[in-house]
Amino acid sequence: LVRLRARLSRSQNALGKTLLTLLSRDTLDDDAWDEIEDTLVQADVGVTPARQIVEDLRTKVKVYGTRTPDEVRGLLKDELLAQIGKDLDRSLRTEPHGAQPAIILVVGVNGTGKTTTCGKLGRVLVGDGRSVLLGAADTFRAAAADQLQTWGSRVGAEVVRRDEGADPASVAFEAVKKGIEDRVDTVIVDTAGRLHTKTGLMDELGKVKRVVEKQAQVDEVILVLDATTGQNGLRQARVFAEVVDVTGIALTKLDGTAKGGIVIAVQRELGVPVKLVGLGEGPDDLAPFDPEAFVDAILG
Ligand code: GDP
């Protein structure tokens, strides 16, 4: 929590500060509630959820006769947690099945932090004593394979790659094949995030998934979403969620934005739990998503 708070406050998280100032007003009149709603919208909570949160909060404040800023903060915290989905299963399935490695596909729009997330996740797993293989199936972006290779050497994971322009599905196939042969614990496959057309994307990702599934069970499909791209990023992410069965979201670049409210919009729009958060560019800047700690951090 301390680390999370430090990272989020480094980005001068406006949400918590503004909300607390508003909640500390002597009287919470219509204007104050409107401002609270605006603050939530500006933090990318989304228009409808922001309205709902404020309506519920107003009702509760009235019914319970809550007055002190601390009490209102407590109610707001409950409200945010309810929207985020406090009790969802956010565990990552990374355990091998007998002789079969666990397979994790990492998908999302280019630039969101897919390759970086693969590397950081590799680091976490290697740190836990697992053997990890990284598959460089993003064969469209120049240097993606080099970048993954660098991550591999950095975190102690082997990398399977081919030349730029190779068929992504064949790279994914080979990565999984090698993972099985070498009895690796976890195979993480980085994929291309070209959002040309929905059918094109569907064909491409569908093929990657199919060739992997010929050999092993896919345990996680992690959709990477850049928190700084707000509602627009969310719209693009929705296309991915429509073409593959996403099992979890990795929300990156939370260190560089005051728009942490996107967590709420993500849960609501995509209906998939945020499992990981990216808090920087370094190897140790990936954390499991803890709703309670997160809400505490953004409320200051
Ligand atoms: P990809 O195209 O989706 O594979 O994206 P990359 O992994 O290459 O990341 C794009 C840029 O975002 C790189 O400069 C990364 O260092 C940066 N990045 C990725 N995750 C984070 C994060 O959590 N925080 C910050 N500040 N930068 C990140």
Image (cartoon, helix red, strand yellow):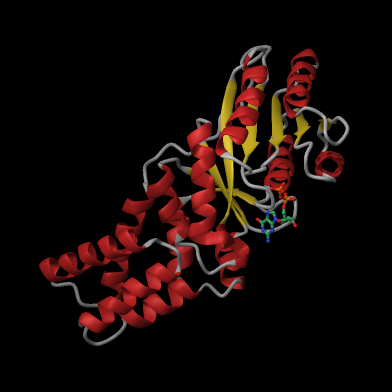
Residue at (70%, 41%) from the top-left corner?
A: 118
Quarter of the view holding residue 135: top right
Residue at (49%, 62%) from the top-left corner?
A: 260
Q: Is residue 218 left or right of residue 119?
A: left
Residue 147 percent coordinates (x, y)? 83, 45
Q: Spot the residue most to the left.
A: 63
Would you place residue 205 above or below residue 235 in this image? above
Q: Is residue 212 left or right of residue 53?
A: right
Count of all numbered marks drawn on residues in the image: 0
Q: Is residue 28 visible?
A: no
Residue at (13%, 67%) from the top-left corner?
A: 64
Residue at (42%, 54%) from the top-left corner?
A: 265
Would you place residue 61 above or below residue 115 in this image? below
Ligand 1 - quadrant of the structure image: bottom right
Q: Spot the residue most to the bottom.
A: 26
Would you place residue 42 above or below residue 140 in this image? below
User: Which of these two is toward me, 185 or 230?
Assistant: 230
User: Which of these two is toward me, 160 or 61?
Assistant: 160
Residue 89 percent coordinates (x, y)? 43, 36
Q: Is residue 209 left or right of residue 281?
A: left
Q: Is residue 264 left or right of residue 110?
A: left
Quarter of the view holding residue 61: bottom left
Q: Is residue 252 visible?
A: yes
Residue 31 percent coordinates (x, y)? 25, 83
Residue 88 percent coordinates (x, y)? 39, 40
